[in-house]
Image (spheres, rainbow, N blue to C red):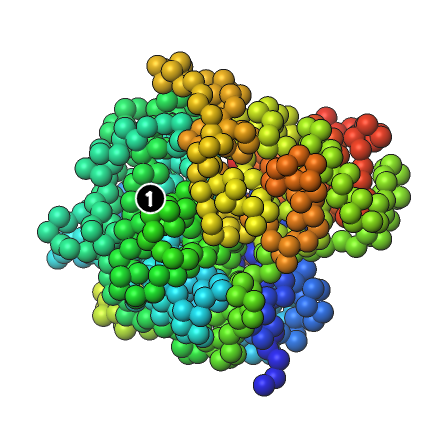
Amino acid sequence: MNSTNKEYSIQVEEFFLEILVPLAKKLHSNKTPIFFRKKPDPAIDTYFMKRKKTTITPEDFETGGCNSPEGLRKALVSLWTAEGHAELLTIADEITKLAGSAHYPEEQSSEVSPFIYVMF
Amino acid sequence: MMTKTILGISAFYHDSAATIVRDGEIIAAAQEERFSRKKHDPRFPKRAINYCLEEAFIESSDLDAIVFYDNPILTLDRVVKNCIEYDQTSLNQFKKASSSILGIKIWVEQYILEAIGSLGKLGKVLFTEHHMAHAASAFYPSPFNEATILTLDGVGEWCTTSVGMGNGNKIELTKEIAYPHSIGLLYSAFTYYCGLKVNSGEYKLMGLAPYGTPKYYDIIKEKIVDIKEDGSYCLNTEYFGYPDSLVMTNDKFEKLFGGPPRVPETKITHKEMDLAASIQKVTEEIVLKIAKNAIHETGIRQLVMAGGVALNCVANGKLLSENIVDNIWVQPAAGDAGGSLGAALLASHAYFSIPRRMNSNGRDTQKGSFLGPSFKSSEVIAFLERKEYPYQQIIDSDLRATKIAQSIAEGKIVGYFSGRMEFGPRALGARSILGDPRKTETQSIMNLKIKFRESFRPFAPSVLADDVSEYFELTAESPYMLLVAPVRKERCLPFGLTEFQSGNSDMLPIINQPRSDIPAVTHVDYSARIQTVHPDDKPDYYKVIKTFRQITGYGLVVNTSFNVRGEPIVCTPQDAYMCFMRTDMDLLVLENCLLYKEDQPSLKNDDDWRKTYELD
């Protein structure tokens, strides 16, 4: 790990422990789970959810990316505002800062990226 | 209407790829791994993009649009919300995930600009949604004007399973199941627990399943996954590691199944076989129920599928054999690579409103999935001459087919390199290794001396499309090796399983027993993973099999991908020659040139080649 990566790692850990975990605790004190079901519920008939958007429009093609940290901040604020997750707006700035620090080009000559895992 | 040329890109998860579509016609598509020689290469597909641009004879600045196959902002949203949901326990995962998503994935536009020097005529990148791209890759190239759509994979942004329908130019996805509930991740968890690699070992687990009995089926359904009548499902995440750690399963999962995961490369025991059989049964139940429910809702009995789970050809075969669908079409590049194709087609039809192209002969528009690079005979000869490799050029295609078919009939193993490379994980006769299906020992020879892979893994037959029902309980076409069906009963032979069932887990004695008159392609449950070969898709390959039939009376050959374990399928004549020389193959066909092993000089300074490829 080079010095830039070390610095970033410290920054991420600070963000996680000082901002994300306290926010999580606050949110869990009101409702748990917060965003998704974690185990089966025998009482319901279906786990399917109706999609909010069933088709893709030309406008939808233009909303997925960002080309600057500020663009990222705006995209997150827009998404979380539309979803009614006002509590998340407080972390948009911090995530934007992290993105500014993490931003690095992937080297084509290097070994296969460690980020191969499907989830991330 | 002006011509519209669109580049689709999938990258940064697994199996990066690029596709170029012009006015709705697929011009070129390729996975980055074929060029970089790193299996499942997730890196930005610079080489694949350059190939697609060359094939389309255009510069990047001529592109009408560049489309990325998913929405990185929504993926970031999932990563953040997941960590809040699991708070303290997910620090290590968050560190890794944030580096990946914030360091790489959200900056797609910059990668493209740096890689190809332009963002095309729009001056910006378009983004789709992961499962919309899968749905588009399944529906638009299919032969159906209307179809029920089903997408199933690990996860894309939030969605893991989606259901909808396609009609003409329009795709509508009506309902979905979202992370952390995922049939793909469930299958991957068992893949991991059985000591196989996530994202590549799932196919092996499916091949292992017929050796086992589904002893764990009840416990999986009781403790791990609840399946409703409509096929929707919910996982009990307490048993999984993936929500808050870097591995798929956790202590609770291990306790449930009696111990830690199998150590990779150690002996496979009955426990792994039984786990494989159990999770396969659960998967089939989910897929069949969802499909049944979706078809009931849409009223359309033609089904199209994509997403990694759609590569589960055993489940696909049952959709047909259990009469749940009338017709099925599965995108051959069903995994993330196919997302590049779906993204480009989706932009063609939903952004530029280009009318959908249908094939007037009623077949699909995937072009046999032969969408990658090809090499002219003159290029092959230039390569062989430069390297001074002895070869025989046989221009007459009938004579060439005869020589190849004769070699196969004599029990020789043939490396077959011909035409445009396949797009997707299966070799379909352009980059294939061929053998005689009648010989019992073909399976173990090809596994152990050619592919250097696990002995239990079955091989697939390539059968003349017209002859398929002569050998198998199948009447439909299966051009992409995505349907499993039984070998016809009258061809099957009884074989001894007593010793195996009484506890001896050595699979070789079973493999080496004849199970039918085409033993090399008959799995231990008398099934076969079938590729039907149509003369319109691949005339040269069709001719080889037809000639083999004239010689032997059998209209099918063994077909496996042209590579060794851990190696991507060969792309160039050089890749093919090296693979040929490093294995026990007898004959190499490079376009119209034939190379016999005994004529070739031995490779020098190549003893360490196996270190080149990490075992998958």
Vertical placement of B277 versus A8: above or below?
Answer: above
Lateral position of residue B138 relative to residue A92, left or right: right
- The spot of residue B109 in percent (x, y) is 53, 67
Q: Residue at x 30, y 66 (%)?
A: B298
Q: Is residue B572 visible?
A: yes
Residue at 42% of width from left, 50% of height from top?
B310
Residue A119 horizontal/vertical position (percent): 39, 49
Q: Is residue B589 left or right of residue B252?
A: right
The answer to whether A73 appears left or right of B468 in the picture is left
Q: Please name the residue that numbered disc 1 is placed on.
A: B284
Rendered view: B136 above or below A111: below
Residue in front for this viewpoint, A97 or B224: B224
B57 up-or-down from B253: above or below: below
Q: Position of residue B332 (x, y in %)?
A: 51, 53
Q: Nearer the viewer, residue B614 or B137?
A: B137
- What kind of element bears circle 1? helix
Q: Give the amino acid type for the residue marked by disc 1 in the picture.
A: Glu
Horizontally, residue B91 falls left or right of residue B441, namely: left
In this picture, is B36 found above or below B20?
A: above
Residue at left offset 68%, top offset 60%: B51
